[in-house]
Amino acid sequence: MMKPAAPVVLIIDDESSIRDGCRQALEKSGYTVLDAEEGDEGIKIARNAKPDIALIDLKMPGISGMEIIEIFSRDVPDTVLVMITGYATIVSAVEAIQKGTYDYLPKPFSPDQLRAVVRRAIEHRNLKIEARRLREEKERMEKSFITFVSHEMRSPLVVIRQYIEALKAVAGERLEKDMAEIIERCSARIQSLETLIEHWLDISRIGEGSFAWKKEPLNLIQLIGRSADEMAPLCKEKGIRLTVDLPDQLPEILGDQESLLRVFTNIIGNATKYTPENGNIVLSASVDDYYVTVRIADTGTGIPADKLPLIFEPFYRVRGKEECQRGSGLGLTFCKKIIELHGGAITADSMEGRGSTFLVKFLPHVRAGHEESNTAKPFRPTQGERA
Ligand SMILES: Nc1ncnc2c1ncn2[C@@H]1O[C@H](COP(=O)(O)OP(=O)(O)OP(=O)(O)O)[C@@H](O)[C@H]1O
Ligand SMILES: [Mg+2]
């Protein structure tokens, strides 16, 4: 087996006694040592040799130690930096650490102190590189899992749904009632699986920054109206009254119409799932100096106070009497991710047995030169309240 290469340490110090002392101490311990008596030369060597560790004197004639640290952090980011300093003030130490130094060695130091610092820096470098490798591996796996889910799971599901629809269209009238029911149940299950996969894919895409969304001025009154229209048949079927109670005007927001429509229909969909017959769902909205707030309130089962903080977590579902309702527990996670992508916030208030209210807050979109054009107060925090 090949012997692993000796770690390379670069010393940049204008004092030859320090360079020679370090070289001796480190070579004895098996390190390969390079040195430079001033910054520019050190930078050139580092760019070529990419040393594992660089010991840099903070105070040298010519280019300063701080400048060298900045250049190293940018050009050879894997090199772990240790500064050598004769005047280790807190201020200089803090500044050097902020600029990316790992440790410092105050002059005078013994060979043992030097070796201990270098050993620690090497361990730090190995961990840093391993952490980066794992992070990259995780990102690669997530990406290939997204591709796997969309190709291997979603595509066949779409095909199955299309076959079932074709079956209904072809066999339609000829199907016995119980057969038609079985086919209907298959359809519903496939639909929920498709929704789960869509939510999951979108949540992953938002996480990795590849979710495609438009940022256009939107009229919330229209958006809420469309959501209500879409959900009205389901409410009717379930014997739930859906009321839309909106002001005449609301400020525009900036966002993606289709994603926000999915958010509202999801929240209203939940309200229909967890509200018994003869219940009410009310959609309303208001504006204050900061936000436009949309409220979706229901008179349903409510959510226990200790479970409320968990409902936006992926796959979380409150166990209990509503367990008979089908769902994956990804709906609200999707909503939260989308709203946060829009720079807004989503929260819920609830009282068990009384109902739940979901609040979705958006920042109004203030067009240049149109600040006073609608009823909403422009988004302008009053003095003192932001601190
Ligand atoms: N309006 C509501 N009233 C009562 N409980 C609710 C309400 N909305 C959400 N919940 C609770 O929060 C949980 C999470 O909701 P979420 O929408 O994420 O999942 P789901 O509706 O169970 O499944 P799906 O992924 O199909 O939407 C639900 O399982 C339910 O227990
Ligand atoms: Mg849901």
Image: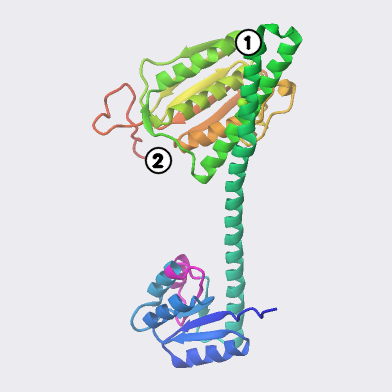
From the top left corner, tell me how far across and down residue 253 is, in percent. 38, 29
Q: Are marks 2 and 1 in contact (CB under 8 Å)?
A: no
From the top left corner, tell me how far across and down residue 380 is, in percent. 33, 34
- Rendered image: mark on residue 148: none
Q: Helix, strand, or loop for circle 2? A: loop
Mark nearer the N terminus (2 vs 1)? 1
Q: Helix, strand, or loop for circle 1? A: helix
Q: Is residue 82 magenta?
A: yes
Q: Label 2 neighbourhood size at 10 Å, few (<14), some (14-19), many (20+)? A: few
Location of the C terminus (image quadrant): top left
Q: Which residue is mark 1?
A: 238
Residue drawn at x 73%, y 28% is 319
Is the residue 290 above or below the residue 189 in the image? below
Mark in the foreground, 2 or 1: 1
Span of residues in magenta: 75-101
* One can see residue 311 in this view: no
Q: Which residue is mark 2?
A: 386
Nearer to me, 139 or 350: 139
* One can see residue 226 in this view: yes
